[in-house]
Image (cartoon, grey):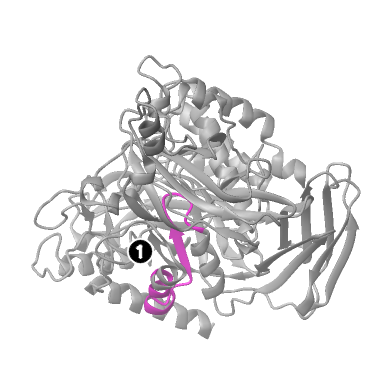
Amino acid sequence: MRAMARGLGGIVAAALMASVVSAAVEPPSTVVTALPLATAQNSPLLVSADMRGGIDLSGPWHYSIDPFRAGLAGFHGETPDLGQRRYLDIDVAKEMASDNRAMYEFNLDHAPLTVLPSSWLTAAPEMRHYQGLVWYQRHFDVPASRHGRLFLRFGAANYSAYVFLNGKPVGRHEGGFTPFAFEVTGLLRDGDNQITVGVDSQATPATVPPPVTDWENYGGLTRQVRLVETPDTFVDDAWVRLTRDGQIAADVHLNGPAAAKKTVRLRIGELGVDIPGTTDAQGNWHGAIAAPAALVRWSPDRPKLYDVAVDAGEDHWKDRIGFRTIEVRGTDILLNGKPIFLRGISLHEEEIGAAPTRAITPASARALLGEIKDGLHGNYVRLAHYPHSELMTRTADELGLLVWSEVPVYWMIAWDNPATLATARNMLAENILRDRNRASIAIWSVANETPVTDARNSFLRTLVADARRLDDTRLISAALLVDHGKGPGAPVMTLADPLAEAVDVLALNTYNGWYTADRLSDLPATRWNVPTDKPLVFSEFGADALAGFHKPQKFSEDYQADYYRATLAMADKLPTLRGMSPWILKDFRSPRRQNPDFQMGWNRKGLISETGVRKMAFYVLSDYYQAKDKAAAAR
């Protein structure tokens, strides 16, 4: 299994090192290049780290903007002088008071405070549209009686992160939505410790995603930061799943000096599963048994989770895991061997409220996903356009929602840049390795709305191949574009994307009647030219509506509701359609949407407003899904 989990290492690591020069958003400097780069291939995975003990570093942090990145490099690209090094472990005021030659142009001890995790966009009014580098700093205590190893683990930092502990460089990471960790056992001191993190949100033509998107770029430490404790040798990765041939299989990797030839044991107490084994010379172990007859398979109707444990010496790894199979047979999507229609909606990682800050909590995750499960009668969610918080996928496990999980290979990526490909591959690996134990994950998506070129095709086929190597138990897709034509009295839609051959599920974004001049009355007669040998899902369709606005025109609730009625009537005529995730559950911030009468910086395609008010179209889709559910139950 470790060959599968780490098989991308040589290629990706080499290309990622190249990206330091060709894709970095900051100028080269001694400080930047001295920091080790965290990737899924050369750093601890700490799978299910949120279930390990440790110190939660959520709470107040000082912050300081650095728009010219002076803390990373001097203005000639050299190492920054002492007066700009935000990460120094000193008392700035004391140093300057004791020596009139000392001069510092920062003092994070006296800088403004914000509460993390969150985006800096909501830290203060003047930060609302800031994009660039921000330094965060706080102090925390570590007991002298600690044992084993300790890691700083970040749920996400958007987009590039530079981490320092007690003034010493720890590491850096690129990618705004996936976790990373650094070992700091030897850098910690008894009692007070200082952590400093520089987070740079600025996108470039070489980053993933690129600078132009249709959502808010929430810079900052938007997910939990923890100091995680482990024994000297610990379970770094454990992937436990139900295979399509009916076995409970586990692949385990140990990290530490005693990883080789180590006794391990997989336990699922409720099922009476107890499988002993011994790791190989690389610390890997694979085990499998026939699934017990008592196993309850996870499904949206019965989202059963089991307490799963792996014992390895002093380490006792644990997770909550559901067991199910997902596959394609002809044009059907099969869950646990039975056809399922995916009744879903798309969703951005924004909590409900007038001033979202991308700080998902258990309560906000349940509020969002509960609207889908209970309000829309859904069984599926597209978490667009990037990996969402672990809290979202864990909550989907608990509520019983199948998940489409995506990396931000979006619109105009630098397809010919090897460093951009390396970054995308690493993001995909970090996403899959984090969430392979989540029963809810059904589809890995490698892209959204990308124009067809030879370079793009090669780029995306590489990602598809990576996903298959890392996880052979789930389906692969990408949200594709279709060609719009005019036929006699109705649109003609043609899928001509060669990537259709490489994916398991065909997924199309279509906005007939919103971004086109089609009459809504013509939509049900739309003719679709799509491959007929694979299941099809509508990954997006939608129309904007300002909640409370009622007039016979676009941007009204009435038009949005009529749009949904016409599009659903069109969908019912596609014989291979097996699901949909309309765009989108909730109105979300998007700086490109600036109509002052209706948008005001919000994309209004939500079925609920940003504050949770349900629009007319919400009930149109809810009634449609409820009828679909009842019809399926009657069969």
Asked whether 6 falls inside the magenta stretch, the response is no
Element type where label 1 sits in the image: loop
Q: Give the answer, above or below, for where 239 lies relative to 373.
A: above
Residue 329 in picture, x, y percent from top left: 62, 60
Q: Residue at x 59, y 79 (%)?
A: 302
Residue at x 48% of width, y 27% of height: 455
Task: Residue 328 in the image: state x and y as whole percent.
Answer: 61, 59
The segment highlighted magenta reads 368-389
Picture mark count: 1
Left or right, 164 with reference to 182:
left
Residue 222 visible within the image: yes
Q: Is residue 531 visible?
A: no
Q: Give above or below for 231 relative to 392.
A: above
Across and down, in percent, residue 415 comes to: 45, 28
The C terminus is located in which quarter? Answer: bottom right
Q: Which residue is mark 1?
A: 351
Q: Quadrant for residue 485, please give it.
A: top left
Could you tell me which residue is drawn at 30 percent across and 46 percent down? 214
